[in-house]
Image (cartoon, helix red, strand yellow):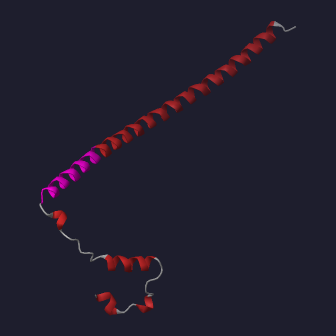
Amino acid sequence: MMTTLDKVQLLEQRIVKATVLIRNLEKKIEELNDEVEVLSVHNEELQKYADNFSSDSKLIEESINNALVHLDSIQGLDDIEVIDSLSGDLETADQFTGGMGLSIDEVTLDDLVR
């Protein structure tokens, strides 16, 4: 059977352990509160970015629609034949990126000046 002194010492040890646990919990709560504050600031920044992006997207959409309205007002625009002047340049670029273009030894100064 435990004596009163043993019980008091056991109670003291438990109080010390509880005090340590409480201090650890207080520190953890403080750390979590700091994290919440940082995340809140970050969330506000992201919300501003999202709002700006949404606003910019609406402005871009309005600008595109206005441009299309202006283009629609030009009579005969759809009847104009588009000259495919870039097809040769695009074909050359495709050959170059596909590895079928000229090597550096095959290029002359005249080719570069054109």
Q: Residue at x 54, y 27 (%)?
A: 29
For residue 2, above or below residue 79: above
For residue 114, above or below residue 68: below
Using the image as rendered, state which of residue 33 and residue 106 is in the foreground. Answer: 106
Q: Residue at x 60, y 26 (%)?
A: 25
Q: Which quadrant holds the N terminus?
A: top right
For residue 17, above or below residue 90: above
Image x and y of residue 32, in percent:
52, 31
Q: Which quadrant holds the C terminus?
A: bottom left
Image x and y of residue 42, in percent:
41, 40
Q: Is residue 66 found inside the magenta-colored segment of the image?
A: yes
Q: Which residues are magenta?
A: 55-74
Using the image as rendered, state which of residue 79 and residue 56 is in the foreground. Answer: 79
Image x and y of residue 48, in percent:
33, 40
Q: Residue at x 73, y 18 (%)?
A: 13
Answer with left or right where residue 64 lies relative to residue 74.
right
In which quarter of the view is residue 54 placed?
A: top left
Q: Main secondary structure of the magenta part?
A: helix
Q: Is residue 49 found inside the magenta-colored segment of the image?
A: no
Q: Residue at x 19, y 63 (%)?
A: 78
For residue 25, above or below residue 39: above
